[in-house]
Image (cartoon, rainbow, N blue to C red):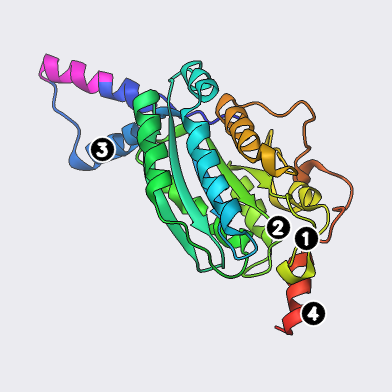
Amino acid sequence: MRWYVSIGAALIAGAITASDVAGVAVPNPRARHEMQAADKAQPVVDVELVLAVDVSYSMDMDELAVQREGYAQAIVSKEFLQALKALPNGKISVTYFEWAASTDQKIIIPWRVIDGPETADAVAEEILKTPIRRASRTSISGAIYFAMPLFENNPYPGLRRVIDISGDGANNNGAPVTPARDEAVSKGIIINGLPIMVKDPSYSTMDIENLDWYYEDCVIGGPGSFVVPIKDREKFKEAIRTKLLLEVAGRTPERPVIPVAEKEKEPRINCLVGEKMWQDRWGR
């Protein structure tokens, strides 16, 4: 589902201009404020994209570096810029933040508009120059709850709102992930997933089998939502580029994933598996 905003503000603004020319009194301050707010809500970009990137300790330094490089290179790639140019408005707004525990989120790139090579280069450079960090715990729910209000404070509203979550483990901190996902979807936000599965599951790093299933059944949601799993370290950057291209174009992979809200069957994986593993291990 695409986001459409009423054009009533534009029509009202036109009427005001005409009345001013004709010498008719302008609206009172309250009416003027309401019209300014409505005008601010007009879509100016095609997609509002939140990039939520996992920096938990289960990600090694090489993975974190490749992840950063993957997003930076994807944004400046010829394919991405061509997809951008083909959009109705030819531009998106993007913000990039890193997350770990439920109270640990750090914005690396505040909202920026990407509308061509120059703005894409500026965002990519800003991503790469920020020092890499790692932090404890994995709270996908915390990332979703942190991402939702970012849309309300975005000065560049768009036709679609998308949260792009990458991570290599299940939620094990903060609120359960499914209520967070459902709340975001109820607000018209689409959540897509990039599960990182380049290492064999290890008890020491709280990894789980079939992380892609977990993301499909417990994390993503909204019309056309999808998962692009990374199972080969060599294809890390390619997967990131593919995912961004699909999000910008509003498309889904060739093998579409049915959003969990539309599924009749129970999830293939317990959506509290991460919390259970942590409880079994640490008793809290």
Question: Element at badge 3?
Answer: helix
Residue appearing at x 41%, y 56% in the figure: 131
Q: Are marks 2 and 1 in contact (CB under 8 Å)?
A: yes
Where does label 2 land, which residue?
A: 178
Residue appearing at x 62%, y 59% in the figure: 59
Q: Earlier in the sequence, mark 4 or mark 1?
A: 1
Amino acid carrying mark 3 in the image: Ala
Q: Residues within 10 Å of mark 3 (few under 14, many from 20)?
A: few
In the depicted view, which residue is nearer to us: 12 or 86? 86
Amino acid carrying mark 4 in the image: Asp
Residue appearing at x 80%, y 29% in the figure: 255
Q: Quadrant of residue 164?
A: top right
Amino acid carrying mark 2 in the image: Thr
Q: Earlier in the sequence, mark 3 or mark 1?
A: 3
Marks 3 and 4 sit apart, C-alpha to C-alpha, by: 59 Å
Q: Earlier in the sequence, mark 2 or mark 1?
A: 2
Q: Residues within 10 Å of mark 2 (few under 14, many from 20)?
A: many
Question: Element at badge 1?
Answer: loop
Q: Are marks 2 and 3 in contact (CB under 8 Å)?
A: no
Q: Residues within 10 Å of mark 4 (few under 14, many from 20)?
A: few
Residue appearing at x 58%, y 53% in the figure: 62
Marks 3 and 1 sit apart, C-alpha to C-alpha, by: 48 Å
Q: Magenta stretch: dominant SS?
A: helix
- Magenta residues, start to end: 14-23
Picture disc at residue 31: 3
Where does label 1 land, which residue?
A: 271
Image position of 209 with respect to 31: above or below? below
Q: Specify the quadrant that holds the C terminus.
A: bottom right
Residue 237: % across, % down? 60, 37
Question: Element at badge 4?
Answer: helix
In this rendering, which labeled residue sits more in front, label 4 or label 2? Answer: 4
